[in-house]
Image (cartoon, rainbow, N blue to C red):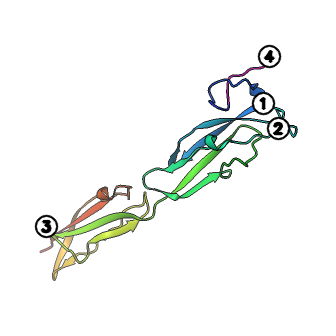
Amino acid sequence: YTLDEIGTEDPDEPDEVADKYQVTVTFEAVNGTVDKTKAVVTLFDEEGQPAEKGTGYLKQDQIATATAEAGYNQGTLTWTPETPTTAYGIKKNMTFTASFDARTDLGYEVHYFYDGEEDTDNCVTDGKGTLGERIPYDTTLTEYNGKNYVLDRVDGKDKTISADPAQNVVNVYYTLDE
């Protein structure tokens, strides 16, 4: 008798195929999620018999679907070592890892205030940036309506761009320098 604790239909249930003829395929994601974390594949020799040194193939319903996390671009999905398919020959336990790139089109705003009055000429209401990058702003805009100002404070000084545009706001406050 040979151990049978894993299976191709349910990876955590026996399937009447000796485990020594089966391998586990793991699915992982970086900056995203996968809907399946593992699958079991039976290895076969050239004659179609279960074999420890054989090759196995995933079935379509065993292949994980990967989804990007908020702030990451679904269209940049890449798999390593390559995309899992029903034609990819599997010979040993292995892992397929899905990866996603950060979005570069996330909105941010920067507002400049001079003694409480907003400078609408210099405000940025449609800025675009990359997830995790610092929101850019200028602290050298010390002249407004012909008067000199000094920097008072920056609300959101070290803020980085997030997936939520409502959180991507920096306010820069100046006080009159008399």
Residue 24 visible to the viewer? yes
Q: Which quarter of the picture shows residue 90?
A: top right
Label 3: few (<14), some or many (≥20) within 10 Å?
few
If you read the primary sequence from the N terminus, does the residue marked by circle 3 or circle 4 appear first? 4
If you read the primary sequence from the N terminus, does the residue marked by circle 2 or circle 3 appear first? 2
Q: Secondary structure under badge 2?
A: loop
Compared with residue 58, is residue 83 higher up or lower down, i.e. above or below?
Answer: below
Q: Which mark is residue 1?
A: 4
Tag 3–tag 1 contact (CB < 8 Å): no
Amino acid identity at mark 1: Tyr
Spatial separation of the CA atoms under disc 3 and disc 4: 82 Å
User: Seen in the image, is 28 located left or right of residue 94?
Assistant: left
Tag 1–tag 4 contact (CB < 8 Å): no
**What is the magenta range?**
1-7
Q: Name the residue under label 1.
A: 21
Residue 103 lies within the magenta run: no
Spatial separation of the CA atoms under disc 1 and disc 2: 8 Å
Q: Mark 2 points at which residue?
A: 54
If you read the primary sequence from the N terminus, does the residue marked by circle 4 or circle 2 appear first? 4
Amino acid identity at mark 2: Gly
Amino acid identity at mark 4: Tyr
Spatial separation of the CA atoms under disc 3 and disc 1: 73 Å
Residue 6 lies within the magenta run: yes
User: Seen in the image, is 162 located left or right of residue 41?
Assistant: left
Q: Mark 3 points at which residue?
A: 116
Q: Secondary structure under badge 3?
A: loop
If you read the primary sequence from the N terminus, does the residue marked by circle 1 or circle 2 appear first? 1
Query: What residue is rendered at 50% in x and 48% in y?
Result: 32
Quadrant that contains the N terminus: top right
User: Seen in the image, is 147 located left or right of residue 18?
Assistant: left
